[in-house]
Amino acid sequence: MNLEIVTPEARVYEDTVDSVVLPTTSGEINLLPGHIPLVTEIQGGEIIVSKSGEGGQSLAISKGFAQCVGDKISVLAENAIHIDEINESAVEEAQKRAEEALATMEKMSDEEIAMLETQVAYARAQILLKQKLK
C-alpha cells in the first residue's frame, strides 16, 4: 500500500507500507491491503506505520482526514512530525502557552479557540509519543 501524509507546509511521509494504524474520532483503525474504501476524520494522536522487515515507525499527528481507496492511503492533517524530530522542551513550552491563552479566552472567536485546542492536543500527542519511547 502507498501511504502519503501531507500537511499545508509539506509532504511529511510517503512510502510503501504493509499496514497503518490511525487515530480516528471513532477510535483507532488498522488499515491493511484490500481495505474497503474509507474516508474518516483523524484526531490528534499517533500514527503507527509498519513495513516488512522493519518495526513500526511512529508519527505524531494533529486533526485532519484520511482516505483509503484501493492500495492508496492519503492523510491530510494540520500538523504531522516524525518522532525523531520532536523537541520535547519546545513542545511543552508551546503547550503551556496555548493552555494559558485558552484560560483567558474572554475575547476570542470560536475559530481562535478551536485553533488553540488543536495546538494543545497536538502538543500532548507529541509529548506522549516521545515519553512512550523513552
Image (cartoon, rainbow, N blue to C red):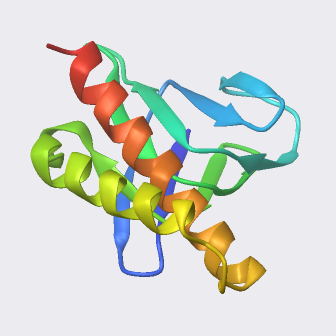
| The N terminus sits in image quarter | top right
Tell me: residue 17, above or below residue 99.
Answer: above
The residue at 49%/24% (across/down) is 18
Q: Position of residue 61 (x, y in %)?
A: 47, 48
Q: Position of residue 128 (x, y in %)?
A: 35, 26
Q: Position of residue 6 (x, y in %)?
A: 48, 66
Q: Is residue 115 left or right of residue 94?
A: right
- Taking depth in this image into account, of 98 and 27 the one nearest to the observer is 98
Q: Is residue 90 left or right of residue 127?
A: left
Asked whether residue 54 appears in the rendered view, the answer is no
The residue at 66%/86% (across/down) is 107
Within the image, what quadrant is residue 51 found in? top left
- Taking depth in this image into account, of 128 and 64 the one nearest to the observer is 128
The residue at 28%/15% (across/down) is 132
Within the image, what quadrant is residue 77 found in? bottom right
| The C terminus sits in image quarter | top left
Asked whether residue 39 appears in the rendered view, the answer is yes
* Tag count: 0
The residue at 23%/20% (across/down) is 131
- Taking depth in this image into account, of 106 and 35 the one nearest to the observer is 106
Q: Position of residue 121 (x, y in %)?
A: 52, 47
